[in-house]
Structure formats: C-alpha cells, structure tokens
Amino acid sequence: MEFFERLKAGLTQLMQLLPPLFFALIILIAGFVVARMVERLADAFLGGLQFDRSAEKWGMREAVERTGVRLRPTDVVGKLLFWLVMLIVILLASSALGVQNINDVFANLVGYIPAVFAAIIVVVFGILLGEFVRALILASAGGVEGVPTLAKVAKVVVITISVFMALQQLG
C-alpha cells in the first residue's frame, strides 16, 4: 500500500511541475522567435544605414576581424541584440519555473555590466591620453637625445595608471 501512496505523491508533484514547465517552454520558444526577429530587423536597419561602411571608417571592422570572428559589424550588432533579448527571455522562463537562483545570478551579472563599460572607457581614455602625452613630449623636446624613450615611458606610465584605475572600477 505504501508503494501506491508514494507513486500517487510522485505523480501529484509531477502534475504540479508540468504547468510551469510548459509555460517556461512557451516563453523560451516565443522569446527565441522574437529574438530572431529583432536580430533580422537590426540587420536590415543597419544595412539600410550602410553601417558596415561607416564601421570600416571607424576601424571597427579591423577590430572585429582581430577577434577571429568572420562576421560583418552589422551581424555582430544583430547577434548582440539577439543574446540580449534571449537573456531577458531566460530570466522570464526561470521566473515562470520559480527558480530564484538563476535570477540572482543574472541580476548580479547585469549589475556588473556598467562597471565593465566604465572600466573599458577608462582604459580607452588612458590610451588616448598616453598617446597625447607621448606626442606632447616629442613635440616639446624636439631633437634632444633620449626624448623618444622618455616619451614612450610616459605613455606606458599613463596607460598603466589607467589600467589600475579600470581594475579598481571593476573591484
């Protein structure tokens, strides 16, 4: 008799789990379709604006090729938008399942993104400022012996300081 009671309890738990699981699956499928549509719309929109041509002028195409990815900059933006939408969809699906841990992990990751962007900006400005300092030293000292080495050292020092500032921003 105990076997049938356990079987009944197990089936009851399974029946309670099926509706949220089914709902989460519907959210994932619908979200995937929406994410693909957003990706295609972004590709079409950026293609109409001739984003690839502009990105080539900005040097973005070279940066993308250096990563080893063989995508056009328009495709990269489309993929980023796709995964952003899918991240939101996964959060919604995990909420439908009642899994709080996944929501907490994603919330921590999303909360960390502004710090990453700030760190990237600090490093980029550090590189620009380092190049400016190098050019300033070279222009002001002219043909004095040892100035090119001093200019390079100054540039490295400025970039190093910016990297440490970025690391501090990241915590």
Image (cartoon, rainbow, N blue to C red):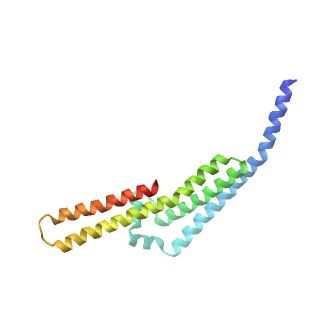
Q: What count of labels does the image hold?
A: 0
Say if 34 sits above or below 108 in the image.
Answer: below
Identified at 46% across, 62% down, the residue is 118
Identified at 21% across, 70% down, the residue is 137
Look at the image and tell me in which quarter the N terminus lies: top right
Snapshot quadrant of residue 163: bottom left
Q: Is residue 131 visible?
A: yes
Nearer the observer, 71 or 9: 9
Say if 96 sits above or below 79 in the image.
Answer: above
Left of 94 or right of it: where is 139? left
Left of 156 or right of it: where is 90? right
Identified at 47% across, 62% down, the residue is 117
Coordinates of residue 170 in the picture (x, y in percent):
46, 55
Q: Is residue 68 visible?
A: no
Say if 96 sits above or below 73 in the image.
Answer: above
Left of 35 or right of it: where is 97? right
Snapshot quadrant of residue 5: top right
Coordinates of residue 4 in the picture (x, y in percent):
86, 27
Identified at 74% across, 47% down, the residue is 21
